[in-house]
Image: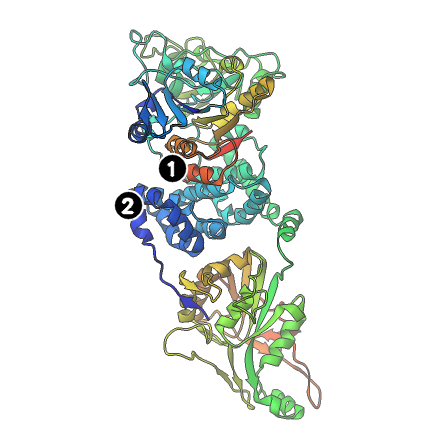
Amino acid sequence: MAQQYPSNIELDKLIAGDGEAIDHAETMLTEQLQRHPEWAEFVLPFLASGQPTLVVNARHLLTLFDEEALLTIARGFEVDDASARFAILGVLWAHLIAMDPHDRQYWIESVAPYLSVGLSDTRTPNRYFADPEHMELENDYRICDETYLFINRLMSDDFDDSRFAVLEEDARTAVVQQFDRRSATLFSSPAVAARKAARQPAALAELTIITNFTTEFEAQTAQFERDQAVAKKWAPALRDFRAVAAVDTPQPTKAIFEVGSFLEMLSAILFVDPSKPKTSAFRPAQSVKRVNIITHGNPGLIAMSGTVDKNGGVMLTTHPSSGPDLLGPIDVAAVQLASDPNLQLDNGKPLAQSLRDRFAPDAEIFLIACHSAMGLSLPLMQDMKALFKTKIQAFSKEIAYCPSLDATHIIDRAFTAIEKCDNGSTRGYKHLVPDRTV
Amino acid sequence: MTDIIIAYGCEIRDTENHTKVVDFLKADATPAGTDKWTYPKKAPVHTISLIYTKAGFAAALNKKDAVVIYDGHSRIGQGPVFGPAGVTTCPDKTKFPLNPWGDNFRMGHAFADIECIDDIMHHGTNPTEFKLPAASKGVLASKGLIDILDDAIKAGKAKCGTAGAWRKLPDCFPKVAAQTNCRGSKPLASRHFWRARKGNKEFDTLVAVGDADLKKSKLECAVLFMNSCSSKRHFLAALQRQKAAVKSKCMFYVTADSCSANTTLPFLKAVLAGKDVTKRSKAILKKMNGMSGSGFISLEK
């Protein structure tokens, strides 16, 4: 069960102050910030404020966190502000350059994918120089130049920036673009994966969530269920989701999770042993590349549990309390609650930040549920993207379940199709192509 | 006693960065002569000296186990420069027969790539032009500089429009070459350029630098923090070469980019607090790089 704790440092006042308060309280602040890596989320927006005092103090504070905040700080590159991006490069440099070479290599490979958007940012940042009139500014680099140099300088001690430094803007652009084209493969190469694997326990890259829908058909005869399916008075439940999931999920015995609430789904993403959220270790950082959520849905609601009656009627379970909670389905209120950076898990770690850190930079979540991209589902998709910091893929049409039948019973529950079963029903879920991505 | 010597270069000694260090020392240390203090006030174990001359900087590098900081301009690789307070961007010839902006401590590559207008004319200097060799082999310079050299050598005697060629400014842009600077001389009159920029309003040229001053040093200091723009690119190769030649153990803090932050002050405070700055310290590197305009500082062997 997640709990909410208030922050006990007035960070906004420190950031708006003259900087001396941070200097004087640095030891205490460092201890507090390292205990609360989620507070980096609060500090990051000040880098885009455009106000020198706020930027300088926010940058200082961000260097007081430890490694637990590094992925959060790197994700700050998503803010479309050149000066904030430059400040983030400075903060990351402060953290990484002080590491031993092995740790530095691991961390640059971990943060670089978030920075790649900077390789196409041709704006020149405000560097907030203390005394600009006394500067001999040799290179008025753009963010794309700075990002290129930052990554390469940290990737190799032998990197020589002298060739880049003498190039004019057009020539630098060509160098950066070439690096940008190969950066995706550079940071997802087998060598990088092997280095990460050597530091982390074996991990699942793909998880499939199926939801706790009970069905009255379980109490009926196989013949009855089969006949109702023929009469189109049938709907899928947990065992059908399980059959579909098992076809396409790698390592299905380990990677398919049955959940009854949003919180249980989050636990499945977070923990190596989701049944023991108080004591289990987190899944390794950046290990989850794909999550499939196979369930029922309505516009604006992704159900986590419910019932199917013997006429194929589906009832979606709603929230157990009047206010927003994590114990029911996924909807905007629940996702926004989970997004609160101060909301903590029972193990004392921040929920939202811990979730985001589990996902690979290019991770995707597939909402394999009817109308998961229709109407009110669109703002829900946006909120989910903001919570998980992943791509969200969904369907505006129905997902049809098309069990294969013989004369007496359902013989294969794993067939699905988009909208109608005569639209080429196929076993599993990976043939279903989402029509909406955010 | 640990000797801490801070060498302030031209212009930077007139900034708030310098004032803040002096104010800190006045408040927290004990005066021990002109520009000299001891620290802490009770049972001092450090002496701190502020120096402002090229000779002082040279002596600092040879001070055994000293912690030396240069806080000044790199002069785009031409080397540190020193002068009295209030040196203007183009100093008057009567007051300064020897232009401080051109009186560098030589500790760099064989040559530097600088701007004719924004550097030579701006500061009223007249640096010795680098004499183009027949081949770049054996020339001690960064890869980027060697590329410039190779292109210029390869182009040979070329027309004014040939990119990368070593062309005479007076032949191609006579009005630019004929300009008189604030000190009454014409430093571009017979100068070559390898690149024209900004719509033919700026010209890049190569000037002789070398490491003659550094070569005289035994680098006995424990640490040298080159707190000047892009000091890694401009000076690290020569420093490492000299370190190997004289079997020094000196460690170098250098910047990868332009810098203006007062990183000298937290570095000084770290040394005074007893931190071993000869080894990689997370606290020190995070503190300095956490400052806006710090220039991406690293510790190099």
Tell me: A368 left or right of A86: right
Quadrant of the rendered structure where residue A57 is? top left
| Front position in the image: A364 or B198 | A364
Q: Which numbered disc, 2 or 1, marks the residue that appears first in the sequence?
A: 2
On the image, the x and y values in percent for residue A95 come to 48, 43
Q: Position of residue B215 (x, y in %)?
A: 53, 14
In depth, the one of A120 and B229 nearer the eye is B229
Residue type highlighted by circle 2: Gly
Q: Residues within 10 Å of mark 1 (few under 14, many from 20)?
A: many
Q: Residue at x 40, y 26 (%)?
A: B46
Residue picked out by circle 1? A127
Q: Which mark is residue A17?
A: 2
* Badge 1 element: loop
- Which amino acid is tagged 1? Arg
> Does residue A76 lie above or below A137 as drawn?
below
**Location of the C terminus of chain B (image quadrant):** top right
Answer above or below: position of A95 versus A170.
Answer: below
